[in-house]
C-alpha cells in the first residue's frame, strides 16, 4: 500500500543541495595514503598562548553564558582591531556581535536584511554556503560571472548589468573562496558608487582579510559612506588557526545590529565563552603568529601555483586566501571527473570547481594550507595523473 503520509520536509530545504565539498570528504574517508588539498583549514595548531588562555578560563570556572552580544572585552578588542587596521570606528556596545564563526555572522546578516523575493547579487565562482544563505530567508541569488582572464576579480560594470528594482544587496567574499581573488580598492570604490546610487546594502565576508599577499586588504565598510550600508562579517578561523573554536563577529550600524541580534539570540544565544576568551588573547598577543603563518602560506602559494603551471594546468596567482584554482580543461575531463578520478587513482583530494558555480566548472580548488612536503608530493601525483589522462 502506498505511503500517504505528508512530506514534512520544507520546499526550501529540499531545494538546497548538500555541500559538494562534503562529498569528497566522505569519498576519501578510510583511503590510505591520501593527501588532501580539499579542506579549507590551516594545518597549524592554534598558537599555544591562545589555547592556554582558554584552558585557564575553564579552570577558573568560566563555563557559563555570556551576553548575547558577546563578552564586552572581546567587542572592545574587536573595535580597537578594526580601527587600527582599517580606520573604522565601531561602538563595541552597539555595533558588534560576537558570533559562532563567520558562518553564523553571514546567516544572521541575510536573515535580518532579506525578505522573500529580494535579489542578492553575488560573484561566480563563490563559496558554497553563499547561495543557500540567500535562499533560506527567501532571497533570490543573482550571479555575476568572473573569469581567469581578469584573475576572477568581481567587476562593478558586471554588477551594474544585473541590478533590478528587486535588488536588495550585494554579497562580497573578499578575498574570494575558491579563487583567491582580491577586489582591488579602485574596483571597490566603483562598487560603492553603484551601492549608493541604487540604495543597496552590502554584506561583506572578510574572513580572509589577513591573508592578502600582494598589497593590503581594503575593508569595504572603510570606503566613504559605506559603513552605514555594510555588514562586515569576520572571524578567527583562518588567520589565527582557530577553525574548531567557532568564534567570529559581525559589525554594522546599531539598527542593523539590533535586527541581527533578534535572530542571533534565538538560534545561538552566544558564542562559547572559552572561545571568546581565546579570541581576546588572539587579538591582544597573536599578531606575530599571524605574520608567521601568512609568510608560510605565501611560500606555499608560489610552489603550488608554479607547480600546477609546470604540469600544464593553467593557474593564475591568487592574491589572497589559501586556494589555487587551476583550469583542468586541457585534460578533457569535467571538474567532477577530474576530482573523483584523481582521488581514486592517485589519492589526492581536490574540490571540483563546479560546486562553486557554473563559472567554476573546468577548474579545481586546491588548498595550500598544508605542509610543503605534502604539496610537493601532491604535485607529483597530479602530474602523473594528468599525463595518464592527456591524449
Image (cartoon, helix red, strand yellow):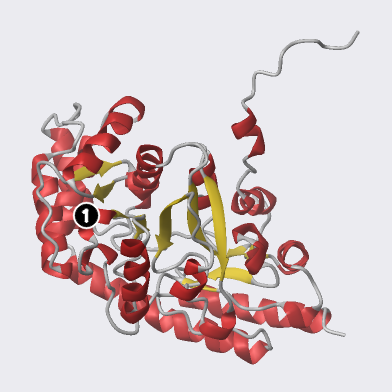
**Residue 54 shows up from this direction:** no
User: How many numbered marks does the figure carry?
Assistant: 1
Residue at 22% over, 36% down: 258
Residue 5 versus residue 25 in the image, above or below? above
Write down the quadrant of residue 321 in the picture: bottom left
| Residue found at x 67% / y 62% | 354
Residue 118 location in percent, x, y?
A: 48, 44
Q: Nearer the viewer, residue 284 or 189?
A: 189
The residue under label 1 is 228
Q: Nearer the viewer, residue 31 or 280?
A: 280
From the viewer's perspective, is 204 left or right of 116?
left
Residue 61 vs residue 275: left or right?
left
Quick check: 383 left or right of 218? right
Quarter of the N terminus within the rendering:
top right
Q: Nearer the viewer, residue 67 or 350?
A: 67
Please say if 134 is above or below 174: above
Q: Quadrant of residue 211?
A: bottom left
**Quadrant of the rendering where the C terminus is positioned:** bottom right
Query: Residue 41's x, y, as percent?
Result: 44, 59
Closer to us: 196 or 261: 196
308 vs 228, left or right, is right
Q: Residue furthest bottom?
A: 310
Q: Residues within 10 Å of mark 1 (few under 14, many from 20)?
A: some
Q: Residue furthest top?
A: 1
Name the residue at 27% across, 35% down. Answer: 259
Q: Position of residue 169 (x, y in %)?
A: 41, 53
341 shown above or below 78: below
List x then y, in percent, for residue 339: 71, 65
Residue 311 visible in the snapshot: yes
Residue at horizontal 31 percent and vertical 72 percent from the top: 293
Secondary structure beneath dot 1 equals: helix
As displayed, is residue 260 above or below residue 122? above
Amino acid at each position: 500500500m502506498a505511503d500517504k503520509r505528508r512530506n514534512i520536509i520544507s520546499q526550501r530545504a529540499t531545494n538546497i543541495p548538500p555541500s559538494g565539498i562534503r562529498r569528497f570528504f566522505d569519498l576519501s574517508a578510510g583511503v590510505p595514503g591520501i593527501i588532501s588539498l580539499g579542506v579549507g583549514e590551516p594545518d597549524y595548531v592554534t598558537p599555544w598562548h591562545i589555547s592556554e588562555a582558554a584552558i585557564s578560563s575553564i579552570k577558573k570556572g568560566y563555563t557559563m553564558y555570556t551576553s548575547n552580544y558577546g563578552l564586552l572585552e572581546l567587542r572592545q578588542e574587536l573595535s580597537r582591531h578594526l580601527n587600527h587596521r582599517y580606520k573604522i570606528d565601531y561602538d563595541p556596545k552597539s555595533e558588534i556581535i560576537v558570533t559562532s564563526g563567520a558562518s553564523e555572522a553571514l546567516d544572521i546578516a541575510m536573515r535580518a536584511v532579506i525578505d522573500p523575493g529580494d535579489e542578492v547579487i553575488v560573484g561566480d565562482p563563490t563559496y558554497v554556503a553563499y547561495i543557500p544563505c540567500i535562499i533560506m530567508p527567501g532571497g533570490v541569488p543573482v550571479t555575476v560571472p568572473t573569469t581567469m582572464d581578469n584573475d576572477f576579480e568581481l567587476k562593478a560594470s558586471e554588477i551594474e548589468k544585473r541590478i533590478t528594482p528587486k535588488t536588495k544587496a550585494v554579497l562580497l567574499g573578499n578575498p574570494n573562496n575558491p579563487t583567491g581573488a582580491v577586489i582591488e580598492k579602485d574596483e571597490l570604490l566603483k562598487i560603492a558608487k553603484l551601492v549608493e546610487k541604487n540604495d543597496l546594502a552590502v554584506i561583506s565576508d572578510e574572513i580572509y582579510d589577513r591573508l592578502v599577499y600582494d598589497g593590503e586588504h581594503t575593508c569595504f565598510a572603510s570606503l566613504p559612506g559605506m559603513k552605514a550600508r555594510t555588514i562586515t562579517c569576520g572571524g578567527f578561523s583562518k588567520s589565527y588557526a582557530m577553525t574548531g573554536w567557532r568564534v567570529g563577529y559581525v559589525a554594522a550600524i546599531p539598527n542593523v545590529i539590533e535586527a541581527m541580534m533578534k535572530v542571533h539570540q534565538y538560534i545561538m544565544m552566544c558564542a562559547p565563552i572559552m572561545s571568546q576568551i581565546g579570541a581576546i588573547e588572539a587579538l591582544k598577543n597573536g599578531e606575530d603568529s599571524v605574520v608567521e603563518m601568512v609568510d608560510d602560506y605565501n611560500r606555499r602559494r608560489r610552489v603550488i601555483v608554479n607547480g600546477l603551471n609546470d604540469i600544464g594546468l593553467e593557474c593564475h596567482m591568487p592574491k589572497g586566501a589559501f586556494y589555487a584554482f587551476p583550469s583542468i580543461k586541457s585534460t578533457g575531463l569535467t571538474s567532477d571527473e577530474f576530482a573523483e578520478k584523481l582521488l581514486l587513482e592517485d589519492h589526492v583530494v581536490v574540490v571540483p570547481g563546479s560546486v562553486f558555480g557554473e563559472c567554476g566548472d573546468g577548474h579545481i580548488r586546491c588548498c595550500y594550507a598544508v605542509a610543503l612536503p605534502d604539496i610537493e608530493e601532491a604535485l607529483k601525483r597530479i602530474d602523473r595523473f594528468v599525463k595518464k589522462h592527456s591524449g
